[in-house]
Amino acid sequence: MNKRSAPSPLKGEGWGGGEKPVDRPLLEIHGLQVAYSGIHAVKGVDFHVAPGELVALIGSNGAGKTTTLKTLAGLLSPASGQVIFDGKNLAKAAAHQRVAMGMALVPEGRGVFARLSVAENLLMGAYCRSNQTEISDDLARMYDLFPRLVERRDQLAGTLSGGEQQMLAMARALMSRPRLLMLDEPSMGLAPLMVKKIFATIQDVAAQGMSILLVEQNARLALQVAARGYVMEGGAITLSGESSDLLGSDAVQRAYLGG
Ligand SMILES: Nc1ncnc2c1ncn2[C@@H]1O[C@H](COP(=O)(O)OP(=O)(O)O)[C@@H](O)[C@H]1O
Ligand SMILES: [Mg+2]
């Protein structure tokens, strides 16, 4: 696997590192199918994320959103279909190689290392990197982005609140210097005020040029911050479009927005 020598996405003006707009999507999914023994969870989905775009994948519980993200991250193997990242077919790329290529997943339920401190969790996020100076710089940048983590840096991650764990999980993912950040239900189980904070940070990160695939059951929230969205139902994408159009559509209103 090639080492990425792109300019640091965590330095200077933003995560995008001044990338010029290109026609090619950063992430392309073609005909993706994923099955658990006997259960056909993802039934042939197509979608894409352009460089610097914030895209929402919404849908109710059991729709196949997490299965899709796990497959993108290399934690599940597709039955068929293609995952193309930055023009490369990832069929043979293992999960750790995908991290090194610039894909980072913040899993459902956060997945922080409960028995490690906040600082240790953050360093784990940089496991695929070797330049210590850059890692220290990025660590400082994470504490700027999430001031709450500074006062907690020596605390065990398992003792943090749900919202703090979500911040830590996002910061840990950003420590790998991703080009695509994949978030699985960041609002799950959090109080409204904390959800607001987390989403404000997602918008900050996006505004700095990061490409983001945001999976949410909270459709309204996700579509309020995303440029475009896809609606997933029963393992298939049933609707897609600009967020404003989806927010205004009768089908989305009825199914997801209580309209
Ligand atoms: N480890 C698993 N083994 C078997 N079936 C699973 C497993 N994980 C999820 N499923 C099933 O796959 C479908 C999609 O689940 P999931 O991707 O978690 O949906 P979502 O994230 O949209 O709630 C559901 O029917 C779920 O029960
Ligand atoms: Mg899920």
Image (cartoon, rainbow, N blue to C red):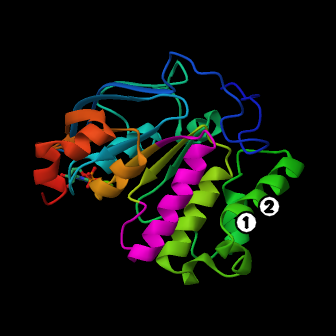
Helix, strand or loop under label 1: helix
The vertical placement of 111 against 73, above or below, is: below
| Residue displayed at 66% across by 35% down | 16
Q: Is residue 251 magenta?
A: no
The label shown at residue 140 is 2
Q: Residues within 10 Å of mark 2 (few under 14, many from 20)?
A: few
Going 71% across and 52% down the picture, which residue do you hit? 126
Judged from the image, the quadrant occupied by ligand 2 is: bottom left
246, above or below 122, in the image:
above
Tell me the amino acid under the disc marked 2.
Answer: Ala
- Secondary structure at badge 2 equals helix
Residue 115 is at least partly visible in this image: yes
Q: Magenta segment range?
A: 186-212
List x then y, in percent, for residue 120. Answer: 72, 68
Image location (x, y in percent) of residue 200: 52, 60
- Residue corresponding to mark 1: 143
Q: Nearer the viewer, residue 199 or 71?
A: 199
